[in-house]
Amino acid sequence: MSDLLSVDFMQRALIAALLVGTVAPMVGIFLVQRRLSLIGDGMGHVALAGVALGLVTGSAPVLTALVAAVTAAVVIELLRTRGRTNGDVALAVIFYGGIAGGVVIISRSPEGTPANLMKYLFGSILTTQRGDLYVFAGLAVLIAVTTWALRPRLFAVANDEEYARAVGIPVLPLNIVLAVLTATTVVVAMRVVGLLLISALMIVPNAASQLIARSFSSGLHWAIAFGLVSSVGGVALSYPLNTPSGGTIVLLAVGLFVVTAVVTSITSRLGGRRHAVAETHPHEHGAECGHPAVTHGDHVDYLHDGHLHAAHEGHYDEHGAPGGPADTHAPDTTTATTASTRGTRP
Amino acid sequence: MTAGPAPAAATSADVAIDLRDAAFGYGERAVLSDANLTIRRGEIVAVVGPNGSGKSTLMKGILGLNERVAGTVTLFGVPSHELRDRARLGYVPQRHTLSASVRATAEEIVSTGRLPRIGWLGRLRGTDRQIVARSLEVVGLGDRAATEVSTLSGGQQRRVLIARALAGQPDVLIMDEPTAGVDAANQHVLADVLDRLVERDVTMVIVTHELGALERLLTRIVVVDAGRIRFDGTPHEYAAARDAVHHDHDSHHHDLELDSDRALLARGPLDATHTDGKRP
């Protein structure tokens, strides 16, 4: 490993991986929430045209890619809000126009070898330049700060756009900001992940985190953890294995998803066999049901005819008699108060 | 019964919503037209009518979610488009379930209702969190704050949406079909929730296709059918107009429309598909 870190280009690639592994899932969770998982893929297509223009004109491909992707992001978001029927087709035209233009223009440029094209499409640990790194770091900080600052509102808009509009949250500007954040993430990730695989790093860590998360914030934290493990791990592995870094990163992310899916399904099956469902009753336990509320570990049980009922999905679980044998985490019965006098939740 | 509505005399500052010859729709096409309606603070108004009659269009028009084709909308004495503080209108949309594309807790959803009340870069402070917690308590979900919303029942999810609207501390609460598709146990809880809101003097406009348990809370009933407001009066007047049809006299009201309304209300032709079997 110390060997790995001493190699110059590996240092740069690992730093780039750290940056992209952090920001890609942060932006991606809102794309998943808005059911736009594939939009990053299209922006990668357009960014290729920007890279190609940079190569032909001799300017920095990272900057031309940024301009192309951000412009496409704004146009796409405007089309999405305006177009009702043809919006989808317009997106396809932009995306395929982008990648086709990119491939053709690159082939005409002095550096336009097929090997070079492969590096842009699927990522390479060799290509991150020192100058790129400063740009990436600046952009990554910008993405992270913007996403963090706007997170409550981005969540509100992605959760219920109509409601957000009704209470006066500026929906279109926020959606454009999210599109620009996506485009910027695409550019930060273009060296190590590659333009065709960027979207995967925004989406797959979130797909895995959604399997274990119980809240939006825990979902976000898990997604960043998965993103970091796959991006840094993928870059580190691609050196000894001599594989394209982008493909290695995404395979690692998919592997994490599969392992998480298997583990969660096994644990939920075991848990499902263990838990006892209480008898059904027509009323719902709550502050006014008349049954005493009992604090039980991390939740509230209701004392129903001498045994504890705990809400679980659409039914009540039997949590046994207070202090009884079925009671695994021993509720503190001294805190039991009648529901009617219980002011606040514990 | 409380004093009946007198739109012509309602000029004081307690007018929350005032529509004059308003028409709402999408693009140029008006779905609901010639709407004249004045709602004052403290009123509990039911907007009833068959499916597709324009009830939701009327609510969305008030909220500025569709296009106003004609007429004026005045909210709290200000023309609708000039009202900056949109959150004074609390909105409970007609949803059968909450978006389940990502995991979120009831508390996280309800917190979004608080956003209009905090600064752009700000976060929820202690008092905001208390208001969120209290909103969840009002709807009887105080013990479910940390529960992932997709594991809640349909009726509980509906109450999460009510709590979200309450978290913005609105002056008027606009609810679109809060009881549709909710099972019997939850309908009772929901009626209790509305009782509590009435006690807290929340002005409410409730779109519904059946008056049912709501009827005793109402100060006023508005009937919408075929894109027009057909009736606007107290529950007493509504009952009288309904009876007039049966006794076959005093036919200067829109008796035929009311009669057909009533028949449709009782059956709920489209809602029947997802609510009927579950009603008590």
Image (cartoon, coloured by chain):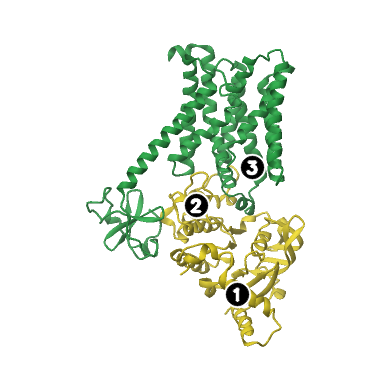
Q: Which residue is mark 3?
A: A174
Q: Which sits earlier in the primary sequence, circle 2 or circle 1?
A: 2
| Chain A as rendered: colour | green
Mark 3, other Cα within 10 Å: few <14 / some 14–19 / many ≥20: some
Q: Which residue is mark 2?
A: B127
**How many marks overall?**
3
Provide the secondary structure element on which disc 3 rests.
Answer: helix
Q: Which residue is mark 1?
A: B263
Decide if residue A321 is on the left or right side of residue A149: left
Q: How much space separates mark 2 and mark 1, taking CA atoms?
A: 48 Å
**Same-chain check, marks 3 and 1:** no
Q: How much space separates mark 3 and mark 1, taking CA atoms?
A: 45 Å
Decide if residue A224 is on the left or right side of residue A85: left
Provide the secondary structure element on which disc 1 rests.
Answer: helix
**Residue A58 shows up from this direction:** no
Position of residue B70 measured from the top left corner of the image (x, y, whole percent): 77, 62
| Chain B as rendered: colour | yellow
Position of residue B44 measured from the top left corner of the image (x, y, whole percent): 58, 70
**Tag 1: amino acid:** Ala
